[in-house]
Image (spheres, rainbow, N blue to C red):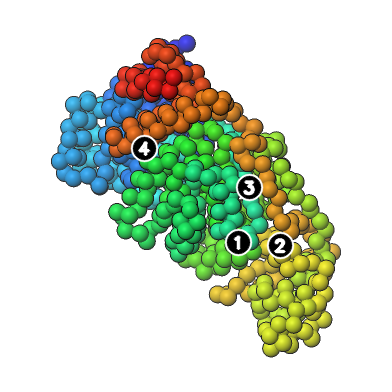
Protein backbone atom coordinates (compact mmCIF):
# COMPACT_ATOMS: atom_id res chain seq x y z
CA UNK A 1 0.00 0.00 0.00
CA UNK A 2 1.40 3.42 -1.01
CA UNK A 3 2.15 6.05 1.60
CA UNK A 4 -0.64 8.23 0.17
CA UNK A 5 -3.14 5.38 0.43
CA UNK A 6 -2.03 4.59 3.99
CA UNK A 7 -2.46 8.24 5.00
CA UNK A 8 -5.98 8.29 3.48
CA UNK A 9 -7.00 5.10 5.34
CA UNK A 10 -5.66 6.54 8.60
CA UNK A 11 -7.79 9.70 8.15
CA UNK A 12 -10.83 7.60 7.24
CA UNK A 13 -10.56 5.65 10.49
CA UNK A 14 -9.45 8.42 12.83
CA UNK A 15 -11.68 11.26 11.64
CA UNK A 16 -14.71 9.57 10.11
CA UNK A 17 -14.78 6.30 12.06
CA UNK A 18 -14.98 3.91 9.09
CA UNK A 19 -12.77 0.86 8.53
CA UNK A 20 -12.77 0.71 4.73
CA UNK A 21 -13.60 2.64 1.58
CA UNK A 22 -16.60 1.88 -0.62
CA UNK A 23 -16.50 1.21 -4.35
CA UNK A 24 -14.08 3.50 -6.17
CA UNK A 25 -13.56 5.88 -3.24
CA UNK A 26 -10.06 4.55 -2.54
CA UNK A 27 -8.82 5.06 -6.12
CA UNK A 28 -10.44 8.50 -6.43
CA UNK A 29 -8.97 9.69 -3.12
CA UNK A 30 -5.53 8.32 -3.94
CA UNK A 31 -5.59 9.99 -7.36
CA UNK A 32 -6.43 13.44 -5.98
CA UNK A 33 -4.25 13.13 -2.88
CA UNK A 34 -1.31 12.35 -5.17
CA UNK A 35 -1.97 15.56 -7.15
CA UNK A 36 -4.09 14.29 -10.05
CA UNK A 37 -7.35 15.67 -11.43
CA UNK A 38 -10.57 13.65 -11.28
CA UNK A 39 -14.10 13.84 -12.66
CA UNK A 40 -16.45 11.78 -10.48
CA UNK A 41 -19.97 10.66 -11.34
CA UNK A 42 -21.40 8.95 -8.27
CA UNK A 43 -24.99 8.60 -7.03
CA UNK A 44 -26.31 10.52 -4.05
CA UNK A 45 -25.41 8.58 -0.93
CA UNK A 46 -22.36 7.05 -2.61
CA UNK A 47 -19.88 8.95 -0.46
CA UNK A 48 -18.82 11.78 -2.80
CA UNK A 49 -17.88 14.18 0.01
CA UNK A 50 -15.14 11.89 1.32
CA UNK A 51 -13.57 11.93 -2.14
CA UNK A 52 -12.43 15.52 -1.61
CA UNK A 53 -12.50 15.86 2.18
CA UNK A 54 -9.91 13.15 2.79
CA UNK A 55 -7.43 14.38 0.11
CA UNK A 56 -7.78 17.89 1.57
CA UNK A 57 -6.77 16.50 4.98
CA UNK A 58 -3.90 14.45 3.54
CA UNK A 59 -2.38 17.14 1.30
CA UNK A 60 -0.65 20.28 2.63
CA UNK A 61 -2.77 23.43 2.46
CA UNK A 62 -6.49 24.15 2.45
CA UNK A 63 -9.07 22.32 0.36
CA UNK A 64 -11.30 24.85 -1.43
CA UNK A 65 -14.81 23.54 -2.16
CA UNK A 66 -16.95 25.31 -4.76
CA UNK A 67 -20.60 24.71 -3.87
CA UNK A 68 -23.81 26.41 -5.05
CA UNK A 69 -25.52 25.65 -1.77
CA UNK A 70 -25.24 28.85 0.24
CA UNK A 71 -28.21 27.92 2.45
CA UNK A 72 -26.54 24.64 3.46
CA UNK A 73 -22.92 25.71 3.93
CA UNK A 74 -23.38 26.28 7.66
CA UNK A 75 -24.68 22.72 8.14
CA UNK A 76 -21.86 21.27 6.03
CA UNK A 77 -19.28 23.15 8.07
CA UNK A 78 -20.97 22.19 11.38
CA UNK A 79 -20.83 18.52 10.39
CA UNK A 80 -17.10 18.74 9.65
CA UNK A 81 -16.33 20.64 12.86
CA UNK A 82 -18.17 17.92 14.78
CA UNK A 83 -15.62 15.51 13.34
CA UNK A 84 -12.74 17.72 14.43
CA UNK A 85 -12.11 19.09 10.94
CA UNK A 86 -11.28 22.81 10.79
CA UNK A 87 -13.79 24.11 8.25
CA UNK A 88 -15.21 27.49 7.27
CA UNK A 89 -17.15 29.19 4.49
CA UNK A 90 -17.41 32.51 2.70
CA UNK A 91 -20.68 33.65 1.17
CA UNK A 92 -22.99 36.64 0.90
CA UNK A 93 -24.94 35.80 4.07
CA UNK A 94 -22.04 36.78 6.37
CA UNK A 95 -21.28 40.19 7.83
CA UNK A 96 -17.93 41.87 7.19
CA UNK A 97 -16.33 40.89 10.51
CA UNK A 98 -17.28 37.22 10.12
CA UNK A 99 -15.80 37.13 6.61
CA UNK A 100 -12.60 38.75 7.89
CA UNK A 101 -12.32 36.15 10.64
CA UNK A 102 -12.65 33.32 8.12
CA UNK A 103 -10.13 34.96 5.78
CA UNK A 104 -7.65 35.33 8.64
CA UNK A 105 -8.07 31.65 9.57
CA UNK A 106 -7.50 30.71 5.93
CA UNK A 107 -4.32 32.76 5.63
CA UNK A 108 -2.84 31.59 8.96
CA UNK A 109 -3.33 27.89 8.22
CA UNK A 110 -6.14 27.41 10.71
CA UNK A 111 -8.51 25.84 8.16
CA UNK A 112 -8.54 22.42 6.51
CA UNK A 113 -11.49 23.15 4.21
CA UNK A 114 -13.00 26.39 2.90
CA UNK A 115 -16.40 26.43 1.17
CA UNK A 116 -17.08 29.10 -1.46
CA UNK A 117 -20.12 29.93 -3.57
CA UNK A 118 -19.15 29.99 -7.29
CA UNK A 119 -20.07 33.66 -7.70
CA UNK A 120 -17.41 34.64 -5.15
CA UNK A 121 -14.69 33.47 -7.53
CA UNK A 122 -15.75 36.23 -9.89
CA UNK A 123 -14.58 38.76 -7.29
CA UNK A 124 -10.96 39.87 -7.65
CA UNK A 125 -10.70 40.11 -3.86
CA UNK A 126 -11.44 36.38 -3.53
CA UNK A 127 -8.92 35.46 -6.20
CA UNK A 128 -6.25 37.55 -4.49
CA UNK A 129 -7.11 35.90 -1.16
CA UNK A 130 -6.58 32.42 -2.64
CA UNK A 131 -3.26 33.55 -4.10
CA UNK A 132 -1.95 34.28 -0.61
CA UNK A 133 -2.25 30.77 0.87
CA UNK A 134 -1.38 27.19 0.05
CA UNK A 135 -4.31 25.46 -1.67
CA UNK A 136 -4.52 21.66 -1.30
CA UNK A 137 -7.14 21.12 -4.00
CA UNK A 138 -10.20 22.57 -5.69
CA UNK A 139 -13.40 20.53 -5.35
CA UNK A 140 -16.24 21.50 -7.70
CA UNK A 141 -19.41 20.05 -6.19
CA UNK A 142 -22.68 19.67 -8.15
CA UNK A 143 -20.60 19.88 -11.33
CA UNK A 144 -23.62 19.24 -13.58
CA UNK A 145 -24.49 22.91 -12.93
CA UNK A 146 -21.93 23.76 -15.62
CA UNK A 147 -23.88 21.88 -18.27
CA UNK A 148 -26.65 23.43 -20.31
CA UNK A 149 -27.75 19.85 -21.02
CA UNK A 150 -28.30 19.38 -17.31
CA UNK A 151 -31.27 20.39 -15.17
CA UNK A 152 -29.63 22.85 -12.76
CA UNK A 153 -27.56 25.06 -15.06
CA UNK A 154 -25.71 27.86 -13.21
CA UNK A 155 -23.91 30.46 -15.38
CA UNK A 156 -21.39 31.17 -12.60
CA UNK A 157 -20.04 27.65 -13.03
CA UNK A 158 -18.77 28.48 -16.53
CA UNK A 159 -15.99 30.60 -15.05
CA UNK A 160 -14.57 27.65 -13.09
CA UNK A 161 -12.51 26.55 -16.10
CA UNK A 162 -10.18 29.42 -15.13
CA UNK A 163 -9.10 27.60 -11.93
CA UNK A 164 -6.64 25.47 -13.88
CA UNK A 165 -5.28 28.47 -15.77
CA UNK A 166 -4.51 30.49 -12.63
CA UNK A 167 -3.46 27.61 -10.34
CA UNK A 168 -2.14 24.92 -12.73
CA UNK A 169 -0.38 22.95 -9.98
CA UNK A 170 -3.47 22.55 -7.80
CA UNK A 171 -5.41 19.30 -8.39
CA UNK A 172 -9.12 19.57 -9.16
CA UNK A 173 -11.96 17.16 -8.52
CA UNK A 174 -15.41 17.75 -10.05
CA UNK A 175 -18.31 15.73 -8.67
CA UNK A 176 -21.96 15.18 -9.59
CA UNK A 177 -24.65 12.70 -8.70
CA UNK A 178 -26.26 12.68 -12.14
CA UNK A 179 -25.08 12.99 -15.71
CA UNK A 180 -25.92 11.49 -19.08
CA UNK A 181 -23.13 10.94 -21.61
CA UNK A 182 -23.86 14.37 -23.12
CA UNK A 183 -23.68 16.08 -19.71
CA UNK A 184 -20.56 14.13 -18.77
CA UNK A 185 -18.76 15.29 -21.92
CA UNK A 186 -19.85 18.89 -21.44
CA UNK A 187 -18.62 18.94 -17.82
CA UNK A 188 -15.20 17.69 -18.94
CA UNK A 189 -15.03 20.23 -21.76
CA UNK A 190 -16.27 23.30 -19.89
CA UNK A 191 -14.14 22.66 -16.80
CA UNK A 192 -11.05 21.81 -18.86
CA UNK A 193 -10.90 18.30 -17.38
CA UNK A 194 -10.13 16.43 -20.59
CA UNK A 195 -6.91 15.01 -19.11
CA UNK A 196 -8.47 14.17 -15.74
CA UNK A 197 -9.10 10.62 -14.64
CA UNK A 198 -12.80 9.85 -14.99
CA UNK A 199 -14.67 7.72 -12.47
CA UNK A 200 -18.23 6.62 -13.22
CA UNK A 201 -19.79 4.63 -10.39
CA UNK A 202 -22.94 2.60 -10.80
CA UNK A 203 -26.02 4.81 -10.62
CA UNK A 204 -28.01 2.01 -9.03
CA UNK A 205 -29.55 2.77 -5.65
CA UNK A 206 -30.79 -0.70 -4.64
CA UNK A 207 -32.25 0.54 -1.35
CA UNK A 208 -34.75 2.78 -3.17
CA UNK A 209 -38.03 1.24 -4.31
CA UNK A 210 -39.22 3.05 -7.47
CA UNK A 211 -42.99 3.21 -7.91
CA UNK A 212 -45.14 5.12 -10.41
CA UNK A 213 -48.88 5.05 -9.75
CA UNK A 214 -51.80 6.12 -11.96
CA UNK A 215 -52.96 9.46 -10.63
CA UNK A 216 -56.48 9.38 -9.20
CA UNK A 217 -56.69 11.71 -6.22
CA UNK A 218 -53.01 12.50 -5.73
CA UNK A 219 -53.24 14.06 -2.27
CA UNK A 220 -55.26 11.14 -0.90
CA UNK A 221 -52.85 8.68 -2.52
CA UNK A 222 -49.94 10.52 -0.90
CA UNK A 223 -51.63 10.49 2.51
CA UNK A 224 -52.21 6.75 2.20
CA UNK A 225 -48.52 6.22 1.37
CA UNK A 226 -47.41 8.22 4.41
CA UNK A 227 -49.89 6.65 6.84
CA UNK A 228 -49.33 3.04 5.80
CA UNK A 229 -45.59 3.04 5.10
CA UNK A 230 -43.88 6.19 6.40
CA UNK A 231 -45.75 7.48 9.43
CA UNK A 232 -43.64 9.87 11.53
CA UNK A 233 -40.77 9.61 9.03
CA UNK A 234 -38.98 12.35 7.09
CA UNK A 235 -39.97 12.83 3.47
CA UNK A 236 -39.93 15.27 0.56
CA UNK A 237 -42.97 15.88 -1.66
CA UNK A 238 -42.40 17.66 -4.97
CA UNK A 239 -45.08 19.69 -6.76
CA UNK A 240 -44.82 21.68 -9.98
CA UNK A 241 -46.41 24.94 -8.81
CA UNK A 242 -46.23 27.09 -5.70
CA UNK A 243 -50.01 26.92 -5.31
CA UNK A 244 -49.88 23.10 -5.31
CA UNK A 245 -47.15 23.19 -2.69
CA UNK A 246 -49.23 25.34 -0.36
CA UNK A 247 -52.41 23.31 -0.84
CA UNK A 248 -50.65 19.96 -0.40
CA UNK A 249 -48.78 21.05 2.73
CA UNK A 250 -52.01 22.32 4.27
CA UNK A 251 -53.83 19.11 3.30
CA UNK A 252 -51.19 17.03 5.09
CA UNK A 253 -51.29 19.24 8.18
CA UNK A 254 -55.10 19.05 8.25
CA UNK A 255 -54.79 15.27 8.22
CA UNK A 256 -52.32 14.99 11.07
CA UNK A 257 -49.01 14.97 9.16
CA UNK A 258 -46.33 17.39 10.33
CA UNK A 259 -45.51 19.23 7.08
CA UNK A 260 -44.15 22.58 5.88
CA UNK A 261 -44.06 24.26 2.43
CA UNK A 262 -40.96 25.43 0.55
CA UNK A 263 -40.92 27.46 -2.69
CA UNK A 264 -39.37 30.59 -4.14
CA UNK A 265 -42.48 32.66 -3.43
CA UNK A 266 -41.97 32.44 0.32
CA UNK A 267 -39.84 35.10 1.98
CA UNK A 268 -36.25 34.09 2.62
CA UNK A 269 -36.72 33.90 6.40
CA UNK A 270 -39.61 31.42 6.10
CA UNK A 271 -37.73 29.31 3.56
CA UNK A 272 -34.66 29.20 5.79
CA UNK A 273 -36.75 28.35 8.87
CA UNK A 274 -38.60 25.52 7.10
CA UNK A 275 -35.39 24.09 5.66
CA UNK A 276 -33.74 24.28 9.07
CA UNK A 277 -36.67 22.47 10.69
CA UNK A 278 -36.49 19.72 8.07
CA UNK A 279 -32.78 19.19 8.63
CA UNK A 280 -32.97 19.30 12.42
CA UNK A 281 -36.23 17.57 13.28
CA UNK A 282 -37.19 13.92 12.99
CA UNK A 283 -40.25 12.95 10.98
CA UNK A 284 -40.98 16.26 9.22
CA UNK A 285 -42.33 16.30 5.65
CA UNK A 286 -41.41 19.21 3.38
CA UNK A 287 -43.62 19.93 0.36
CA UNK A 288 -41.64 21.82 -2.24
CA UNK A 289 -40.98 22.88 -5.78
CA UNK A 290 -37.66 21.80 -7.28
CA UNK A 291 -36.19 24.96 -5.72
CA UNK A 292 -35.61 22.69 -2.69
CA UNK A 293 -33.18 19.86 -2.25
CA UNK A 294 -29.89 20.23 -4.08
CA UNK A 295 -27.18 19.26 -1.63
CA UNK A 296 -29.59 18.31 1.15
CA UNK A 297 -27.40 16.10 3.32
CA UNK A 298 -30.13 14.64 5.55
CA UNK A 299 -29.42 10.89 5.51
CA UNK A 300 -32.72 9.59 6.92
CA UNK A 301 -35.22 10.84 4.30
CA UNK A 302 -37.38 7.74 3.98
CA UNK A 303 -39.48 8.77 0.98
CA UNK A 304 -39.54 11.20 -1.93
CA UNK A 305 -42.91 11.68 -3.63
CA UNK A 306 -43.74 13.51 -6.86
CA UNK A 307 -47.29 14.74 -7.34
CA UNK A 308 -46.46 16.11 -10.81
CA UNK A 309 -44.43 14.68 -13.66
CA UNK A 310 -40.74 15.72 -13.50
CA UNK A 311 -39.40 17.44 -16.61
CA UNK A 312 -36.49 15.05 -17.12
CA UNK A 313 -35.09 11.71 -16.00
CA UNK A 314 -32.01 13.51 -14.69
CA UNK A 315 -34.16 15.75 -12.49
CA UNK A 316 -36.23 12.77 -11.33
CA UNK A 317 -33.12 10.76 -10.47
CA UNK A 318 -31.50 13.67 -8.63
CA UNK A 319 -34.66 14.35 -6.63
CA UNK A 320 -35.45 10.72 -5.76
CA UNK A 321 -31.80 10.27 -4.77
CA UNK A 322 -32.43 12.45 -1.73
CA UNK A 323 -34.16 9.45 -0.16
CA UNK A 324 -32.17 6.85 1.72
CA UNK A 325 -28.72 8.43 1.72
CA UNK A 326 -27.96 6.23 4.74
CA UNK A 327 -28.45 3.11 2.62
CA UNK A 328 -31.60 2.00 4.45
CA UNK A 329 -34.78 1.02 2.53
CA UNK A 330 -36.65 4.03 1.12
CA UNK A 331 -39.40 4.84 -1.37
CA UNK A 332 -39.49 6.94 -4.54
CA UNK A 333 -43.17 7.36 -5.46
CA UNK A 334 -44.68 9.27 -8.38
CA UNK A 335 -48.35 9.87 -9.20
CA UNK A 336 -48.70 10.31 -12.95
CA UNK A 337 -51.69 10.98 -15.16
CA UNK A 338 -52.92 12.30 -18.50
CA UNK A 339 -53.10 15.91 -17.31
CA UNK A 340 -49.37 15.79 -16.52
CA UNK A 341 -48.51 14.89 -20.10
CA UNK A 342 -50.80 17.57 -21.53
CA UNK A 343 -49.42 20.19 -19.17
CA UNK A 344 -45.78 19.39 -19.90
CA UNK A 345 -46.34 19.42 -23.68
CA UNK A 346 -48.04 22.82 -23.41
CA UNK A 347 -45.21 24.21 -21.28
CA UNK A 348 -42.67 23.18 -23.89
CA UNK A 349 -44.67 24.67 -26.75
CA UNK A 350 -45.08 27.96 -24.87
CA UNK A 351 -41.56 28.11 -23.45
CA UNK A 352 -39.04 30.81 -24.23
CA UNK A 353 -36.06 29.88 -26.33
CA UNK A 354 -35.42 28.69 -29.84
CA UNK A 355 -36.43 25.47 -31.58
CA UNK A 356 -33.26 23.71 -30.43
CA UNK A 357 -34.16 24.47 -26.81
CA UNK A 358 -37.68 23.11 -27.27
CA UNK A 359 -36.34 19.99 -29.00
CA UNK A 360 -34.04 19.39 -26.02
CA UNK A 361 -36.95 19.78 -23.60
CA UNK A 362 -39.02 17.40 -25.71
CA UNK A 363 -36.27 14.76 -25.63
CA UNK A 364 -36.07 15.08 -21.86
CA UNK A 365 -39.85 14.69 -21.56
CA UNK A 366 -39.97 11.73 -23.97
CA UNK A 367 -37.39 9.90 -21.86
CA UNK A 368 -39.39 10.61 -18.69
CA UNK A 369 -42.59 9.35 -20.33
CA UNK A 370 -40.80 6.19 -21.47
CA UNK A 371 -39.81 5.53 -17.85
CA UNK A 372 -43.41 6.02 -16.72
CA UNK A 373 -44.91 3.80 -19.41
CA UNK A 374 -42.39 0.97 -19.44
CA UNK A 375 -43.52 -2.58 -18.76
CA UNK A 376 -39.94 -3.52 -17.94
CA UNK A 377 -37.96 -2.99 -14.72
CA UNK A 378 -37.84 0.72 -13.89
CA UNK A 379 -34.36 0.43 -12.39
CA UNK A 380 -33.03 -1.09 -15.61
CA UNK A 381 -34.68 1.73 -17.59
CA UNK A 382 -33.06 4.34 -15.32
CA UNK A 383 -29.62 2.76 -15.62
CA UNK A 384 -29.97 2.52 -19.40
CA UNK A 385 -30.71 6.23 -19.55
CA UNK A 386 -27.35 6.92 -17.89
CA UNK A 387 -25.57 4.51 -20.21
CA UNK A 388 -25.34 1.64 -17.72
CA UNK A 389 -26.79 -1.85 -17.73
CA UNK A 390 -28.56 -3.81 -15.05
CA UNK A 391 -30.71 -6.83 -14.28
CA UNK A 392 -34.38 -6.69 -13.17
CA UNK A 393 -34.21 -5.57 -9.56
CA UNK A 394 -37.18 -7.26 -7.91
CA UNK A 395 -37.74 -4.03 -5.94
CA UNK A 396 -39.77 -1.71 -8.19
CA UNK A 397 -43.47 -1.78 -8.99
CA UNK A 398 -43.05 -3.33 -12.43
CA UNK A 399 -40.97 -6.17 -10.95
CA UNK A 400 -43.20 -6.72 -7.92
CA UNK A 401 -46.46 -6.61 -9.92
CA UNK A 402 -45.56 -6.98 -13.63
CA UNK A 403 -47.98 -4.95 -15.77
CA UNK A 404 -49.76 -6.47 -18.74
CA UNK A 405 -49.30 -5.16 -22.24
CA UNK A 406 -52.04 -5.49 -24.85
CA UNK A 407 -52.59 -4.89 -28.54
CA UNK A 408 -54.09 -1.41 -28.48
CA UNK A 409 -54.04 -0.90 -32.24
CA UNK A 410 -57.82 -0.80 -32.65
CA UNK A 411 -58.26 1.47 -29.64
CA UNK A 412 -55.55 3.77 -30.98
CA UNK A 413 -57.25 3.88 -34.38
CA UNK A 414 -60.58 4.79 -32.77
CA UNK A 415 -59.01 7.59 -30.73
CA UNK A 416 -57.05 9.00 -33.66
CA UNK A 417 -60.06 8.70 -35.97
CA UNK A 418 -62.16 10.76 -33.55
CA UNK A 419 -59.54 13.50 -33.44
CA UNK A 420 -59.24 13.32 -37.25
CA UNK A 421 -62.99 13.66 -37.80
CA UNK A 422 -63.37 16.54 -35.36
CA UNK A 423 -60.62 18.41 -37.15
CA UNK A 424 -61.38 17.57 -40.79
CA UNK A 425 -65.18 17.30 -40.76
CA UNK A 426 -66.08 19.94 -38.17
CA UNK A 427 -62.93 22.10 -38.11
CA UNK A 428 -62.97 21.58 -34.32
CA UNK A 429 -60.41 20.54 -31.75
CA UNK A 430 -61.10 19.32 -28.22
CA UNK A 431 -59.24 17.89 -25.25
CA UNK A 432 -59.38 14.44 -23.70
CA UNK A 433 -62.74 14.75 -21.90
CA UNK A 434 -64.82 15.51 -24.99
CA UNK A 435 -63.04 12.97 -27.22
CA UNK A 436 -63.55 10.21 -24.63
CA UNK A 437 -67.22 11.18 -24.12
CA UNK A 438 -67.75 10.79 -27.88
CA UNK A 439 -66.15 7.34 -27.92
CA UNK A 440 -68.16 6.23 -24.89
CA UNK A 441 -71.38 7.54 -26.46
CA UNK A 442 -72.19 9.90 -23.57
CA UNK A 443 -75.12 12.27 -24.19
CA UNK A 444 -73.70 15.33 -22.46
CA UNK A 445 -74.76 18.93 -22.97
CA UNK A 446 -71.48 19.62 -24.76
CA UNK A 447 -71.96 16.63 -27.07
CA UNK A 448 -75.48 17.80 -27.91
CA UNK A 449 -74.38 21.41 -28.39
CA UNK A 450 -71.81 20.45 -31.03
CA UNK A 451 -73.91 17.57 -32.46
CA UNK A 452 -71.08 15.16 -31.88
CA UNK A 453 -73.55 12.31 -31.48
CA UNK A 454 -73.86 12.43 -35.27
CA UNK A 455 -70.21 11.49 -35.80
CA UNK A 456 -69.64 7.96 -37.09
CA UNK A 457 -67.32 7.23 -34.15
CA UNK A 458 -69.91 8.16 -31.51
CA UNK A 459 -70.25 5.26 -29.04
CA UNK A 460 -67.66 3.11 -30.83
CA UNK A 461 -65.43 2.86 -27.76
CA UNK A 462 -67.83 1.45 -25.20
CA UNK A 463 -65.65 -1.65 -24.69
CA UNK A 464 -63.23 0.39 -22.57
CA UNK A 465 -63.83 2.37 -19.38
CA UNK A 466 -63.17 6.08 -19.12
CA UNK A 467 -60.07 5.36 -17.04
CA UNK A 468 -58.78 2.96 -19.69
CA UNK A 469 -59.36 5.51 -22.44
CA UNK A 470 -57.42 8.10 -20.50
CA UNK A 471 -54.58 5.61 -20.33
CA UNK A 472 -54.79 5.14 -24.10
CA UNK A 473 -54.61 8.91 -24.65
CA UNK A 474 -51.68 9.28 -22.26
CA UNK A 475 -49.71 6.54 -23.96
CA UNK A 476 -50.45 7.84 -27.48
CA UNK A 477 -49.10 11.21 -26.35
CA UNK A 478 -46.06 9.50 -24.87
CA UNK A 479 -45.40 7.63 -28.13
CA UNK A 480 -45.77 10.76 -30.25
CA UNK A 481 -48.89 9.46 -32.01
CA UNK A 482 -50.98 12.34 -30.68
CA UNK A 483 -50.04 15.93 -29.86
CA UNK A 484 -51.32 18.74 -27.65
CA UNK A 485 -51.73 22.20 -29.12
CA UNK A 486 -52.85 25.64 -28.00
CA UNK A 487 -53.53 27.18 -24.63
CA UNK A 488 -56.53 24.89 -24.02
CA UNK A 489 -54.66 21.62 -24.55
CA UNK A 490 -56.61 20.43 -27.58
CA UNK A 491 -55.56 17.32 -29.50
CA UNK A 492 -54.13 17.12 -32.99
CA UNK A 493 -52.64 14.36 -35.10
CA UNK A 494 -48.91 14.04 -35.73
CA UNK A 495 -46.99 12.84 -38.77
CA UNK A 496 -46.78 9.40 -37.15
CA UNK A 497 -50.54 9.19 -36.64
CA UNK A 498 -50.92 8.19 -40.32
CA UNK A 499 -48.81 5.11 -39.68
CA UNK A 500 -51.52 3.81 -37.35
CA UNK A 501 -54.54 5.04 -39.28
CA UNK A 502 -53.48 4.13 -42.81
CA UNK A 503 -50.26 2.11 -42.83
CA UNK A 504 -50.99 -0.81 -40.50
CA UNK A 505 -48.66 0.13 -37.64
CA UNK A 506 -49.28 -1.93 -34.50
CA UNK A 507 -49.63 -0.17 -31.15
CA UNK A 508 -48.78 -2.00 -27.92
CA UNK A 509 -50.10 -0.40 -24.75
CA UNK A 510 -49.70 -0.91 -21.03
CA UNK A 511 -52.94 -2.07 -19.43
CA UNK A 512 -54.38 0.33 -16.88
CA UNK A 513 -55.11 -1.32 -13.52
CA UNK A 514 -58.66 -0.69 -12.32
CA UNK A 515 -57.30 -0.48 -8.78
CA UNK A 516 -53.57 -0.12 -8.05
CA UNK A 517 -52.18 -3.12 -6.21
CA UNK A 518 -50.84 -2.68 -2.69
CA UNK A 519 -47.11 -3.37 -3.00
CA UNK A 520 -44.73 -4.58 -0.32
CA UNK A 521 -43.06 -1.57 1.28
CA UNK A 522 -39.45 -0.73 0.51
CA UNK A 523 -38.62 -1.95 4.02
CA UNK A 524 -39.82 -5.49 3.37
CA UNK A 525 -38.75 -5.91 -0.26
CA UNK A 526 -35.44 -4.07 -0.60
CA UNK A 527 -32.60 -6.35 -1.71
CA UNK A 528 -30.09 -3.77 -0.46
CA UNK A 529 -27.81 -4.51 2.45
CA UNK A 530 -30.25 -4.40 5.37
CA UNK A 531 -29.89 -2.21 8.40
CA UNK A 532 -28.72 -3.78 11.64
CA UNK A 533 -31.69 -5.85 12.74
CA UNK A 534 -32.99 -4.72 16.09
CA UNK A 535 -34.40 -7.23 18.53
CA UNK A 536 -37.42 -6.42 20.66
CA UNK A 537 -34.99 -5.73 23.48
CA UNK A 538 -32.76 -3.43 21.39
CA UNK A 539 -35.56 -1.32 19.88
CA UNK A 540 -36.27 0.77 23.02
CA UNK A 541 -32.51 1.29 23.41
CA UNK A 542 -32.35 2.67 19.87
CA UNK A 543 -35.25 5.03 20.61
CA UNK A 544 -33.57 6.20 23.82
CA UNK A 545 -30.37 6.90 21.90
CA UNK A 546 -32.36 8.90 19.33
CA UNK A 547 -33.89 10.94 22.14
CA UNK A 548 -30.43 11.61 23.61
CA UNK A 549 -29.19 12.58 20.12
CA UNK A 550 -32.15 14.92 19.61
CA UNK A 551 -31.33 16.77 22.84
CA UNK A 552 -27.60 16.90 22.09
CA UNK A 553 -28.27 18.30 18.61
CA UNK A 554 -30.70 20.88 19.96
CA UNK A 555 -28.14 22.11 22.49
CA UNK A 556 -25.56 22.59 19.73
CA UNK A 557 -27.99 23.97 17.15
CA UNK A 558 -27.08 21.34 14.56
CA UNK A 559 -29.07 18.65 12.69
CA UNK A 560 -29.39 15.37 14.56
CA UNK A 561 -27.47 13.41 11.92
CA UNK A 562 -24.42 15.63 12.57
CA UNK A 563 -24.16 13.98 16.01
CA UNK A 564 -24.65 10.38 14.79
CA UNK A 565 -26.58 8.83 11.92
CA UNK A 566 -29.36 6.30 12.54
CA UNK A 567 -27.20 3.46 11.19
CA UNK A 568 -24.59 4.15 13.88
CA UNK A 569 -27.20 4.35 16.65
CA UNK A 570 -28.76 1.09 15.47
CA UNK A 571 -25.40 -0.65 15.73
CA UNK A 572 -24.79 0.81 19.19
CA UNK A 573 -28.23 -0.39 20.33
CA UNK A 574 -27.57 -3.88 18.97
CA UNK A 575 -24.01 -4.24 20.34
CA UNK A 576 -24.48 -2.25 23.58
CA UNK A 577 -20.77 -1.42 24.12
CA UNK A 578 -19.71 -1.29 27.77
CA UNK A 579 -16.69 1.01 27.47
CA UNK A 580 -15.09 3.60 25.22
CA UNK A 581 -12.83 1.08 23.51
CA UNK A 582 -15.81 -1.02 22.45
CA UNK A 583 -17.71 2.09 21.36
CA UNK A 584 -14.74 3.11 19.19
CA UNK A 585 -15.25 -0.08 17.18
CA UNK A 586 -18.71 1.06 16.00
CA UNK A 587 -18.82 2.28 12.38
CA UNK A 588 -19.17 6.05 12.28
CA UNK A 589 -17.52 6.73 15.64
CA UNK A 590 -14.31 8.62 14.94
CA UNK A 591 -11.83 10.02 17.47
CA UNK A 592 -13.48 13.40 17.86
CA UNK A 593 -16.99 12.01 18.29
CA UNK A 594 -15.73 9.41 20.72
CA UNK A 595 -14.15 12.13 22.84
CA UNK A 596 -17.13 14.43 22.56
CA UNK A 597 -20.06 12.05 22.93
CA UNK A 598 -18.64 8.72 24.08
CA UNK A 599 -19.30 9.03 27.79
CA UNK A 600 -22.78 10.47 27.15
CA UNK A 601 -23.64 7.44 25.03
CA UNK A 602 -22.35 5.04 27.68
CA UNK A 603 -24.30 6.88 30.39
CA UNK A 604 -27.47 6.65 28.28
CA UNK A 605 -26.96 2.91 27.85
CA UNK A 606 -26.26 2.47 31.58
CA UNK A 607 -29.55 4.13 32.49
CA UNK A 608 -31.40 1.48 30.49
CA UNK A 609 -29.92 -1.53 32.25
Mark 2 or 3, nearer chain start: 3
Mark 4 vs mark 2, foreground winner is: 4
Mark 1 or 3, nearer chain start: 3
Are circles 4 and 1 on residues that touch, CB within 8 Å? Answer: no
Q: Position of residue 463 (x, y in %)?
A: 83, 68
Q: Quadrant of the C terminus?
A: top left
In the picture of the structure, the residue carrying the numbered disc 3 is 211
Q: Is residue 485 left or right of residue 377?
A: left
Mark 4 or 2, nearer chain start: 2
What separation in Å lies between label 1 and label 3 (alpha carbons)? 16 Å
Mark 3 or 4, nearer chain start: 3
What separation in Å lies between label 2 and label 3 (alpha carbons)? 17 Å
SS for callout 3 = strand
What separation in Å lies between label 4 and label 2 (alpha carbons)? 44 Å
Are circles 3 and 4 on residues that touch, CB within 8 Å? Answer: no
SS for callout 4 = loop
Residue count near mark 3 (Cα–Cα under 10 Å), binned few <14, some 14–19, many ≥20 = many
In the picture of the structure, the residue carrying the numbered disc 4 is 559
Mark 1 vs mark 3, foreground winner is: 1
SS for callout 1 = loop
Q: Position of residue 147 (x, y in %)?
A: 46, 47
Query: Which residue does the image show at 42% across and 55% down from the upper left?
Result: 261
In the picture of the structure, the residue carrying the numbered disc 2 is 471
Above or below for 16 versus 359? above
Asked which quadrant contains residue 250, the reply is bottom left
Amino acid sequence: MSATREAAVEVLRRVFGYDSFRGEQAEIITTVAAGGDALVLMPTGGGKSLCYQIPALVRPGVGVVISPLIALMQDQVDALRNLGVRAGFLNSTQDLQTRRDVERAFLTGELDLLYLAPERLRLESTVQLLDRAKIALFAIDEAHCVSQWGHDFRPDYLALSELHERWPEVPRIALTATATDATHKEIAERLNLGDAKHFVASFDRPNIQYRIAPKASANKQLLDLIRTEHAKEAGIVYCLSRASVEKTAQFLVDNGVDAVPYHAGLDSRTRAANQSRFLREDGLVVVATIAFGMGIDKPDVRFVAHLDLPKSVEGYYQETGRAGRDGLPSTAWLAYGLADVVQQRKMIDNSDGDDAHRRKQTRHLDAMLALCETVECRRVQLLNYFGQSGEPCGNCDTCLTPPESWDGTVAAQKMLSTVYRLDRERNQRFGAGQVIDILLGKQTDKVAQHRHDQLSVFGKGAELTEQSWRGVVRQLLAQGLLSVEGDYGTFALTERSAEVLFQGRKVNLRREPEKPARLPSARTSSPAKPAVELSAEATPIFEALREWRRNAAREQGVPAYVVFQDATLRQIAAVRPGNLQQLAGISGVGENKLARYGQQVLDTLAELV
